[in-house]
Image (tube, grey):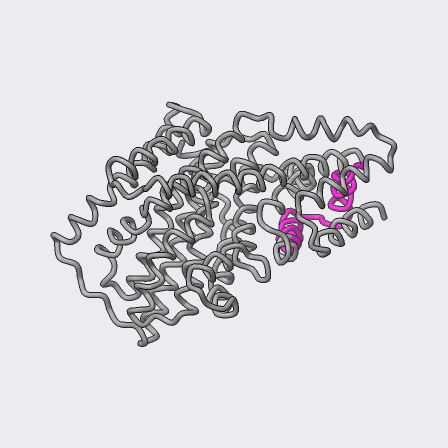
Amino acid sequence: MTLLVIFGALLLLLFSGLPVAFALAGLGTLMLLVEGLPLVMVAQSLHGSLDNFILLSVPLFLLMSNILLKGGVGRDLFAAVQSWVGHWPGGLGIAALLSCGMFSAISGSSVATAATIGTVAIPEMTKRGYTKSFTLGLLAAGGTLGILIPPSIPLIVYGVIVEESIGKLFLAGIGPGLLLLLLFCIYAALYAKFTSAHQPTPKATREERRRASLRALPPSLLAVVMIGGIYSGAFTPTEASAVGAVLAFLLTTFLLRTLTWAGLLEAVRQTLSTTVVLFLVIIGAKIFGRAVTLYQVPLMISQLVDTHLDSVAMFLLVVALILLFIGLFLESLSMLLIMVPILIPSVIALGIDPIWFGIFFVVLIEIALISPPVGLNLFVIQAVAKTNLGTVIRGVTPFILIMLLSVTLLVLLPDIVLYIPFKLN
């Protein structure tokens, strides 16, 4: 009964329109008051939530992605990839997806990935006759790769919550990220093959490929430096985010000369705004998490799992259904901060690898990013394309089905996640 009251109250607050951070913090504080517990615990949570060196990487990765966005790096990446694969069947769609994958490996942000590549790919694809719904759906879905292909901000937060290695989580995200990218590209090629509305792109000359590739080489090397530095042990994920932010500034200011002072100030402003919202949600989730722990909610969940779910597969199915449902009205990071502390005791008890579960969880978060009515990438692409939301929703529906297929493959073939961090590394 207590469990139903807590989650009923949380859903009521969220549906009332109260910001997620204040809903979590307010309900957590009320729960502490009802039990007569000292409110000093709230103050301790406020400090303890952010007193973590790893979380410093979040605003730095955000700053790096915003600098790259304002510096027009996505345009160079798209032009380079398009020069190589643009003439293939569905080549422009494949080029957009590959550009999303490459920008994801630099930025770690789904919103930045969708906005950056969408800005340059949408006009080009619509000019070539691709339907608006397919184009917008492809870019919205491709943007979700930003939180799976490392570096990934949600994986950093997940690692902090469950106290797992950020490096191993990053490695674990590579296989599923490439799988999802491959499945998206196959769908884009099949779509192009069986529809004839679009015009093929002329094959680029060798000189055009050379020029475009040279222009895109520095941003690509930025990803190599960061990810290579983390995996080689040269620096931690937090240090990598600082290196990435500095290199992104030097790259766009002095080498490419595409970042203006106005653009830099806007990048800093957007980073500050996003960081404040993000950290308020983390603080609220910490207070709520402290309260639900004192109310023994994780223990109740574990007992329910032991009583009613007799297999790992059934537990994962229930978790997936719950996340897909709450993803309809809750944004991705809030899902992670609310549900992971509650679910992780059952995950450990059932013998599920926490690294694998983190990737499983993030792929489901990716689906939430393009699920109406609050999927953030839907609104990003809608704003970029200046169109109605229904067009974007129609376009993402096949990609949601593809992502559900990828979740099934991760369950059936766990080595897609675990091979690189544990058997190859």
The answer to whether residue 78 is seen in the rendering is yes
Q: Residue at x 36, y 45 (%)?
A: 70
Figure quadrant of residue 184: bottom left
- Residue 220 in percent (x, y) is at 29, 41
Query: Looking at the picture, how far across and down is residue 143, in whole percent?
Result: 44, 53
Extreme residue in the top direction: 234
- In this figure, what is the number of numbered marks? 0
- In this picture, which residue range is highlighted in magenta? 295-322
Relative to residue 254, is residue 149 depicted above or below?
Answer: below
| Residue at the (47%, 62%) spot, across then down | 382
User: Picture quarter containing residue 301?
Assistant: top right
Residue 170 on the magenta span = no
In the picture, measured across the screen, residue 157 lies left or right of residue 174, that is right
Q: Position of residue 132 (x, y in %)?
A: 40, 70
Residue 287 rendering spot, x and y as whole percentages: 71, 35
Residue 310 within the segment the image draws in magenta: yes
Quarter of the image with the C terminus in it: top left
Q: Residue furthest front?
A: 262
Of 347 and 369, the residue lying toward us: 369
Q: Nearer the viewer, residue 249 or 367?
A: 249
By secondary structure, the bulk of the magenta-drawn segment is best described as: helix
Task: State left or right for residue 150 relative to residue 298.
Answer: left
Picture residue at 22% right of the left edge, 55% below the top: 84
